[in-house]
Image (cartoon, helix red, strand yellow):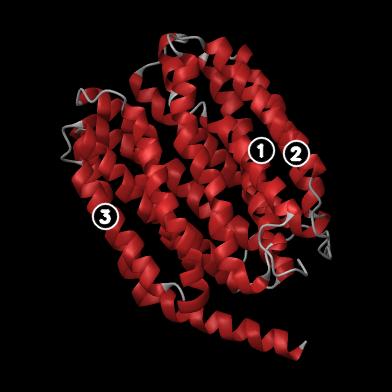
Amino acid sequence: MSGSQKILTRDFILHFISYFLMATSFYFLLPTLPVYAVNALGASNNQVGYIIGVYALSALLIRPFCGYALDAYGRRLVYLLALAFFTLLMFGYHFASTFTLLLLIRVFHGISWGIITTGGSTIAADLIPESKRGEGIGYFGLAMTLAIALAPYGGDQIMGQNNFFNLFMVASIVAVASLILAFIMKVPVVKTGDTRIQLSKMFDKRVNRISVVMFTGAFPYAAILTFIKIYSDEKNIHQGALFFIFMAIGVAIVRLIVGKIMDKKGPSALVFVGLSVTIIGLFWLSNVDSFWPLMMVGVLVGMGNGIIMPTVQTMALNIVPVERRGAANATFFSAVDLGIGAGSIALGYVAEYFGIASMFFVCGVILLFPLVFYFTSVRKHYGKQVELLQDEQNHD
């Protein structure tokens, strides 16, 4: 635990930049790997969803073990090993000469991604003063947000006319830079626990209800990541990859204030506004036919994501003791991965048979579920768990 009440310490800033570079190298490949698969490897369009799906599902499978490992063996060791493996795999894309090999690399990349994102968020929580956790998590989330916004467009520009060698080389170099900064960073030492592997150490059941909100909330996010470029091309909207930049603008607008509201007022109003704004954006997205409406949808969806992600993650961290943060983050991110993995594959079939516009409309309908579920099942449960944890800490 950080003794200072400052959020922007040397190590927090180093961690932020390193995490941003790691995510940038990864998201360079988001709009470009489908192009590589189709143009260089001869893959069919209906295989594209699997490029997103297999990495998300492999990340999901590793999350329970990395949550346990972070709590049992220490954050720094586990995080650095995963980041080194991630960097090595980035060089591996140069050798992905068949679609099967590409999917195999995606599986292993998903494993490293699962460990890094769980570990990175856990380290961030350790670096942030407890009284400013919501605010700090909101700031740290901007690293991923900026990468998701800037890197897909950057990757598209680096690739140009199918220049895949340049694309993979730049992504690899950026990953190396991330690894170097992570080695320089100092991580607070948290007392490690019993190293025996038990299911109860991998997940934290206190976070289960919160995770249901994230699982269903991740479906439309998967659809946007997978299909927005194909959709914009279908609609003859040029520069559709700019959607991600406008999405980041939406996230940035709200991220700087959401954490402070969460710390002072709690999550309920934020969850309501975040999900409602996203639903409106998805219904609008199913009807766009020109550049600026598409970009405005990007801002709306970005605002929704920028409210929901840090709010719900802070909820997960607020109801567990410090030595269980790894397991709490593993539970939280497992739900996100499962939603992205299942969503990208299942919604791919919806897009195939009913069209991409109809699929985005369906996504808006799906989001009505977590909105209702939060207010009927999560809100009271969260309040009760916060009180129980405070009582525990007061008795210690």
Spot occupied by residue 123 in the image (x, y as percentages of width and height): 71, 55
Spot occupied by residue 216 in the image (x, y as percentages of width and height): 38, 55
**Residue hosting label 2:** 181
User: Which quarter of the figure has residue 132?
Assistant: bottom right
Residue at the spot 42% in from the left edge and 59% down from the top edge? 307
Q: In the displayed structure, would residue 273 be above or below residue 91?
A: below
Q: Is residue 36 left or right of residue 195?
A: left
Q: In terms of secondary structure, where does tag 3 sit?
A: helix
Which of pointers 3 and 2 lies earlier in the amino acid sequence? 2
Position of the C terminus by quadrant: bottom right
**Residue hosting label 1:** 112
Q: Residues within 10 Å of mark 3 (few under 14, many from 20)?
A: many
Residue at the spot 35% in from the left edge and 74% down from the top edge? 375
Q: In terms of secondary structure, where does tag 1 sit?
A: helix
Which of pointers 1 and 2 lies earlier in the amino acid sequence? 1
Q: CA distance from mark 1 to mark 3?
A: 32 Å
Amino acid type at image mark 2: Leu
Q: Nearer the viewer, residue 375 or 16?
A: 16
Amino acid type at image mark 1: Ser
Q: In the displayed structure, would residue 249 be above or below residue 154?
A: below
